[in-house]
Amino acid sequence: MLAQVVTLGSHANGTLQQSLLLARALAALSFDVRLVSLTPDIHPSVIEAGRDVRLGLVAATPDEVPPAHLSIVVGLWDAPSVAAAAALARGPGRLILAPTLYRQQSLLSGFSGRAEALWFVSWDQAVAARDSWHLAGRVEVVRCVVDTERFRPSGRVPTGDPWVVCRHSFDDPSKFAPDTEFIVRGVAQEHDVVFEMLGAARSLATTEGGRLRAYPQEAFDPALFLRRGDLWVYAHAPQWRETACVAMLEAMACGLPVVVNNLGGMREYVAHGRTGFACNSSREFVEFTCLLLDRPSLRAAMAAEARAFVERRHSLASLVPRLRELLGA
């Protein structure tokens, strides 16, 4: 039986990663799987994943996506994926909509079809989009997962000479708290530390005497970048909300405790006090980061629990039985 996952394929972002892992899970359920890119320039990571799991790779315009027994359209924050979903709704086959951001409400307002299901990545996202629930027969939460083979702990022992606090994200100002430098200064007053930020070269400058190091988005492979870190600290602008934050899951899979905003879907993806800390203010970012640096045993315990948490709830192995249940496969 042919299943296809339809998404933008030109950017290595969380939506693309979610699409790839959904495709891999469908392949594990013995579907013949095709991944459809709505842009002609398929990202290299898609091509590499296609080789790994023998996915069929197709580039198509939104109104020319070929039919399949099952189509899952991932994203829906962009006009091409919404248009593809609308076109598929007029044809045969099962259709599932899988939004990945909060912005799908206005785009989906023009969607005149009806899907079998809406798959959100967090309940916070689902509730925020409740005006669109009528577009599908049922609403489910299918949480994001990561490749725990690619993202894994380095095995190195942190020395604190200096401590390395890292983060990776898209290089967009919304991804950065306006008081990022306050957090860097506050932690640096107490500890020998550097903040390494992948995907920050445009939004931030290397400052604070070299304590904050901003790198272009493609400067390092994220999995290799995370293996040289001791903590993952992600403070974003107050107007931004993450539906899930795949980057955070990647850090946790690498055995890094996380210090993040207590907002959006991230609250469902971090176990406060066990896998990291969810913060309500910039001062809490400083306090919790310093706490983890002050107490190596706590940092080590949280590192182990972060990895175990992702393996249990956010790995490919955990996604396969969830899809079997939802699809009746």
Image (tube, rainbow, N blue to C red):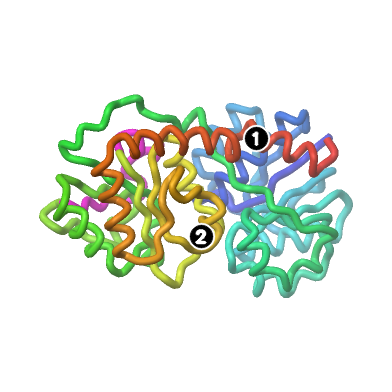
Tell me if label 2 and label 1 are in contact, CB under 8 Å.
no
Say which quarter of the image contains residue 200. Answer: bottom left
Identity, as a three-letter code, of the amino acid under mark 2: Glu
In the foreground, 104 or 191: 191
| N-term mark: 2 or 1 | 2
**In the rendered view, does 205 fall on the left or right side of 29?**
left
Residue situated in front as seen by the camera: 128 or 191: 191
Residue at 17 percent of width and 53 percent of height:
188
Residue under label 2, please give it: 242
Give the label on residue 11, or none.
none
Residue at 37% over, 55% down? 234
Q: Is residue 270 magenta?
A: no
Q: Which region shows up in magenta? A: 211-229
| Residue at the image position 39 percent from the left and 63 percent from the top | 236
Q: Label 1 neighbourhood size at 10 Å, few (<14), some (14-19), many (20+)?
A: some
Query: Amino acid under label 1?
Result: Ser
Left or right, 135 with respect to 27, comes to: right
In the image, residue 70 above or below residue 174: above
Residue 251, percent from left and from top = 42, 41
Q: Can residue 171 be seen by looking at this rendering?
A: yes
Q: Position of residue 260 (x, y in %)?
A: 41, 55
292 in relation to 91, above or below: above
**Which quadrant, please, contains the C terminus?**
top right
Q: Residue furthest top?
A: 155
Q: Secondary structure at mark 1?
A: helix
Image quadrant where one finds the N terminus:
top right
| Observer-nearest of 248 and 6 | 248
Tally the numbered discs: 2
- Residue 329 position (above or below residue 276): above
Tag of residue 318: 1
